[in-house]
Image (cartoon, rainbow, N blue to C red):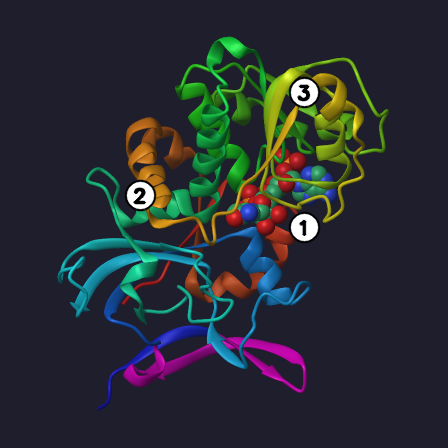
Amino acid sequence: MTQTYKALVAKRLDGKLAVGFEQLSAAEIGEGDVEIAVEYSTLNYKDGLAMSDAIPIVQQDKLILGIDMAGTVVSSDNSRFSVGDKVVLNGYGASETHNGGYTQRLRTKGEYLVKLPAGISTRQAMAIGTAGYTAMLSVMRLERLGVVPESGVVLVTGASGGVGTVAISLLSALGYRVTASTGRMEEADFLKSLGASDVINRAELSEPGEMMQAPRWAAAVDSCGSHTLANVIAQLHYSGVVTACGLAQGLDLPSNMMPFALRNVSLLGVDSVHAPMPLREEAWRRLAKDLDMAKLEALLVNIPFDDVPAAAGKILQGQIRGRAVVEIGS
Ligand code: NDP
């Protein structure tokens, strides 16, 4: 009997996106020089967006969904990879222009893959996932602008989400004093267990605010955009820095010039999808060194592969706490 592999596939029919499980043949699992037995994937906010088609993330008539995956190389024509290597894929157009990680078997280009550093298992890699790797990129962006623990308090918005929880864990492990902003005050103890010193209600940041406000933050990691980011910019200290990677509140940025011109503040974009390979490798090395894997366990929500379509709606409604790991299974 011909071997087939279970995959979650999106098909665009008459402009509408249909999402469902299919059994794919070896010829349908993608193109490239490396084949991977996928062990774990994740559910990210962007996966939710892709399945809802609220933003046209899927740009092909048919592809395998899932913006990330981790697994073991089963065949390779690429000199960087050998059979048995543990690898991770984040972004690079996965689930946008070519096949992603919601599949038992994936064939893709070696140039998209990072070899996992020793000390990170495939499950831990997906517990980190694209959200956690983006949190690491955000922290590295702050560091490159000279932010150090002595600079002062660092705010993390969208605190209970994937980027937020890993950012809090990383920053506190690195010695920063962290304030978490959340819409789920019932998660305050959880956020403190990750390392937040203080927790504020996101309602303090989510409404339109003054152009310049009392300085509160030396730096911030934002994944919300919209009024939240505008208020954070207005509340940065002199020479404060905020990274912006996400749009959980909205795509807009109703900010103004005053904090930039009068307080010397910096707004730094963070993109994980097309981050160059040396930066990715550095981020994964740093995650292996700086992230407390015991804390990571506390962030995990396990999602069976079959439940991914239903869970996608929940993540868009902010109903998933921490990092959602999908066990693909053979
Ligand atoms: P999650 O859904 O896991 O977390 C987002 C969090 O934002 C929620 O948990 C919630 O936290 C908060 N939130 C939700 N709705 C609102 C709202 N209306 N106003 C304010 N806060 C809200 O998503 P991720 O952490 O995976 O991703 C966060 C964002 O970052 C997304 O927009 C995602 O697309 C983007 N992203 C971008 C990347 C890039 O490369 N640029 C890579 C990875 C993610 P709480 O309940 O604590 O308030």
In terms of secondary structure, what is the magenta stretch mainly? strand
Q: Which residue is mark 1?
A: 317
Q: Nearer the viewer, mark 3 or mark 2?
A: 3
Ligand 1 shown in quarter? top right
User: Between marks 3 and 1, how big is the CA–CA gap?
Assistant: 35 Å
Q: Which residue is mark 2?
A: 281
User: Between marks 2 and 1, how big is the CA–CA gap?
Assistant: 32 Å
Look at label 3 and name its amino acid: Asn
Look at label 2 and name its amino acid: Glu
Residue ID at (39%, 34%): 296
Q: Are discs 3 and 1 less than 8 Å apart at CB?
A: no
Residue 158 in picture, x, y percent from top left: 62, 36
Residue 144 in picture, x, y percent from top left: 45, 26
Residue ID at (31%, 48%): 123
Residue 138 in picture, x, y percent from top left: 50, 34
N-terminal of the pair, mark 3 or mark 2, is 3
